[in-house]
Image: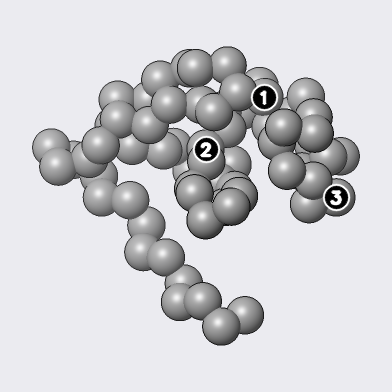
Amino acid sequence: MDQPTPRPAPSGPEAQPVVCASCGARSPDGAPPTWTCSVENGARLYFCDDCARANLRAIEGTLDSPWW
């Protein structure tokens, strides 16, 4: 609650490629709005649609990704 809201990733030519933390899928234009973002141990992790759907219950239960 005391953390500032992160700004969305830039889109366009300055966007950084994003890699799924689970399967390694790449999104060259930044994280699509359908990907899931998680902050674990101070690091921001992104998960692709397929990985997020496969682990939805664990994500909603706020379990860290090493658990699932």
Residue receiving disc 1: 51
Question: What residue is at 60 percent from the left and 23 percent from the top?
Answer: 22
x and y percentages locating residue 28 in the rendered image:
30, 25
Q: Residue at x 79, y 29 (%)?
A: 68
Q: State the colouring used for the structure image.
A: one colour
Give the SS element for disc 1: helix
Q: Which residue is pictured at 52% across the width and 41% down the height?
A: 45
Q: Secondary structure at mark 2?
A: strand
Amino acid at pointer 3: Gly
Numbered circle sitting on residue 61: 3
Q: Amino acid at mark 2?
A: Tyr
Whether label 1 touches label 2, CB < 8 Å: no
Instruction: Name the residue carrying label 2.
Output: 46
Q: Residues within 10 Å of mark 3 (few under 14, many from 20)?
A: few
- Amino acid bearing label 1: Cys
Residue sitting at the far bottom:
2
Mark 1 vs 2, N-terminal side: 2
* Count of numbered marks: 3
Alpha-carbon distance for marks 3 and 1? 15 Å
Q: Nearer the viewer, residue 24 or 27?
A: 24
Give the residue displayed 33% in from the left and 51% down from the top.
Answer: 9
- Left/right placement of residue 54 relative to residue 57 reads left
Residue 23 place in picture, x, y as percent: 58, 16
Left or right side of 55 for 16: left
Where does the image place residue 1, in percent across and percent down from the top left? 62, 80
Q: Is residue 58 left or right of residue 37?
A: right
Q: Is residue 46 left or right of residue 55?
A: left
